[in-house]
Amino acid sequence: MIDFAIARLNMVESQVRPSSVTDRRVIDAMATIPREAYLPQSLRHLAYMDQDIPLEGSDGETRYLMHPRVFAKLAQLAEVSKGDVVLDVGCGGGYSTAVLASMSEAVVALECDEALSAQAIETTIEQGVDNAAVVTGPLNEGYAGEGPYDVIVLSGAVREVPRSLLEQLKERGRLVAVVGDGPVGRACLFVRHGDVFAEKTAFDAKVGPLPGFAASEPEFVF
């Protein structure tokens, strides 16, 4: 039988810390929150592997629980603070939501797949995550009704970030995402300054894609 507490510690010490993650809040959250609880029983043995984990939803799209080291680096890049309101786009089974909720004031967790959304609701309640709300809808549209947001995290790779999603940020709000249409994307930080969104490339990353971000969408021009 797997000792998940030891596996969790090993994940932090062998994957997260060596990847230049120094934000104490990210490290503490990932060392504490049971990643396995947010996976189906059949996948829990993979919870702390050094890889994306495929998730089965109801819409036929293969989804992924993001690679631990990539998610940790994205969470650090977003500089989430305790007073922030966060939009978690593509929350899957709810793990990313739980981590972000531990670091912020509140999280709106957006999921397009009804089965995964139901799983995220059930598990976050079971785990006592009381400052997050899971909603269902198209990922590329965001969730403007609860915005604007201090932070938006895209929990998967996209070909491009729609302007309509960037516009759901508050002034000086941050959006982090892995962007690209090749085998390896680039983790990007977008910061809002009025009607301008400054973009910074932080690191290369290979993660599973989020559905709904089609190449035909108008490309945002800076």
Image (tube, grey):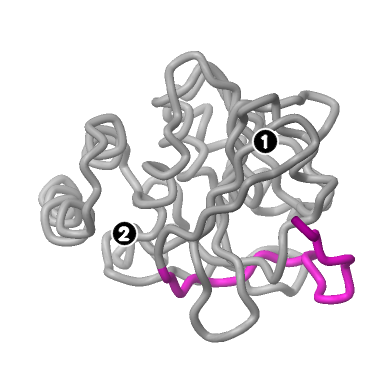
Residue 104 on the magenta span: no
Task: Please name the amino acid that badge 1 sits on.
Answer: Arg
Q: Which residue is mark 2?
A: 69
Choose between 220 and 86: the one closer to the eye: 220
- Is the residue marked by circle 2 packed among few (<14), some (14-19), or many (20+) residues within 10 Å? many
Residue 115 versus residue 46 in the image, above or below: above
Majority SS type along the magenta span: loop
Residue at the location (70% across, 25% down)? 170
Image location of residue 112, percent across then percent down: 76, 53
Residue 71 versus residue 127 in the image, above or below: below
Image location of residue 19, percent across then percent down: 22, 59
Residue at the location (19% across, 56% down)? 11
Residue 80 versus residue 64 in the image, above or below: above
Q: Which residues are magenta?
A: 204-222
Choose between 191 and 88: the one closer to the eye: 191
* Residue at the outermost bottom position: 183
Tell me the quarter of the image containing the C terminus.
bottom right
Q: Tag 2, which secondary structure?
A: helix
Q: Tell me where residue 150 sits by quadrant.
A: top right
Checking the image for residue 103, the label placed there is: none
Q: Are marks 2 and 1 in contact (CB under 8 Å)?
A: no
- Is the residue marked by circle 1 packed among few (<14), some (14-19), or many (20+) residues within 10 Å? many
Residue at the location (41% across, 36% down)? 99
Q: Which residue is mark 1?
A: 192
Q: Tag 1, which secondary structure?
A: strand
Q: Tell me where residue 211 sits by quadrant.
A: bottom right
Of the numbered discs 2 and 1, the one sitting upstream in the chain is 2
Image location of residue 43, percent across then percent down: 40, 66
